[in-house]
Amino acid sequence: MHAYFLLSLPRLHPELASLPEGCRTLWPGLPRRPEHAWAPELPWPPALAQACLADYERACRDGASGAPVHALGAEHAPADLSDAERRALREMAGMPAEEPEQPLRQTAQQVLLLTWLQEKQALDMAELEKKISASRRELAGLLSGRTRVGEASFLPRDNDLPDWKKTLAAALAFLPDMPENIVVLAKPKNLDISTAWVYKNYNPQRVVNNPCIWHIAECITSGAKAMTPFMGNVLETVTIPANPQIAIIKMAMLKAGAYFSMMSGSGPTVFAFAETKEIAENIVDALKDFNVETAITTTVGRKNI
């Protein structure tokens, strides 16, 4: 049984997010994780993440002073280390010398570490502005002989914070992976659907089968067959009544052996899951008299990118 909790994104520091009770922030893998933070399975141990963060901090100082900025990342910094020194550094950090490459997840953790540092620097600057403002009020009060009360709120401006889209993309890299599943795609020719029109005409009261995100998340590592009972596309209630050929394609795919079929997004493409490559080819063959473009592919886990 999985324990569910709310995860606050894209900000990593609780000071930058209004956290409801039980909500957690994402931790980039540094030592001394606070109680409010959740850490996914990260490629780097805390000591190596700390070394990477130190590289970033040094690069910020070098950049501010006009000194040359060294290569970032504990994996390849400093640049003048010998192979033996690199192996010793990895051993000290608790990282096996022959660990396989995880480029996507390593890059994602680097983004999270850089985000954490940028947020911290923005918070430090806001705190400094707060102290300067308080000193100015105190000085003005002494000069005027009057006590000035009230304290302005100082929080980092959005322009001073990291790009939330990059942070969110990095966080998504640590969601559970879906095993490979065979997928058949069918796109009706000469049929274009306006996504804007679909959303404009969407009526939630027409929805009968709502997808259950929580159950899908729980089943994702078991593959598509475990997920399909909880899947659904609410936009079918708009697109299919106006384009019934989409429903006909779905039924044809199921009849040819697919164990699930559904419209993709706002349409008109339909996808189906097949247990074997042979069944997938049967589905494509069953659609040969339909005015559709077809393709057979597979789902791809992020670890394989």
Image (cartoon, grey):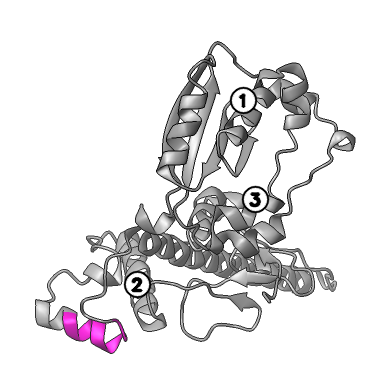
Q: Position of residue 157 (x, y in %)?
A: 62, 54
Residue occupying the point 85% across, 37% down: 204
Query: Would you name the residue on which mark 1 appears?
Result: 249
**Left or right, residue 269 beside residue 54:** right
- Quadrant for the N terminus, please: bottom right
Residue occupying the point 54% across, 73% down: 27
Q: Amino acid at mark 2?
A: Cys
Label 2 vs 1, first from the N-terminus: 2
Residue 87: quadrant of the picture: bottom left
Residue in front for this viewpoint, 257 or 133: 257
Residue 4: quadrant of the picture: bottom right
Q: Tag 2: Cα neighbours inside 10 Å, few (<14), some, or many (≥20)?
A: many
Query: Would you name the residue on which mark 3 appears?
Result: 228
Q: Is residue 5 above or below residue 159?
A: below
Q: Residue furthest bottom?
A: 92
Disc 2, disc 3: CB below 8 Å? no
Residue occupying the point 55% across, 10% down: 190
Q: Position of residue 286 (x, y in %)?
A: 51, 25
How far is disc 2 from disc 3 in space, using C-alphas? 41 Å
Task: Name the secondary structure under disc 1.
Answer: helix
Q: Position of residue 61 (x, y in %)?
A: 34, 67
Q: Is residue 72 above or below residue 39?
A: above
Which region shows up in magenta? 87-95
Q: Amino acid at mark 3?
A: Thr
The answer to whether one can see residue 209 in this image is yes
- Of labels 2 and 1, the one closer to you: 1
Label 2 vs 3, first from the N-terminus: 2
**Left or right, residue 62 beside residue 38:** left
Disc 2, disc 1: CB below 8 Å? no
Query: Would you name the residue on which mark 2 appears?
Result: 52
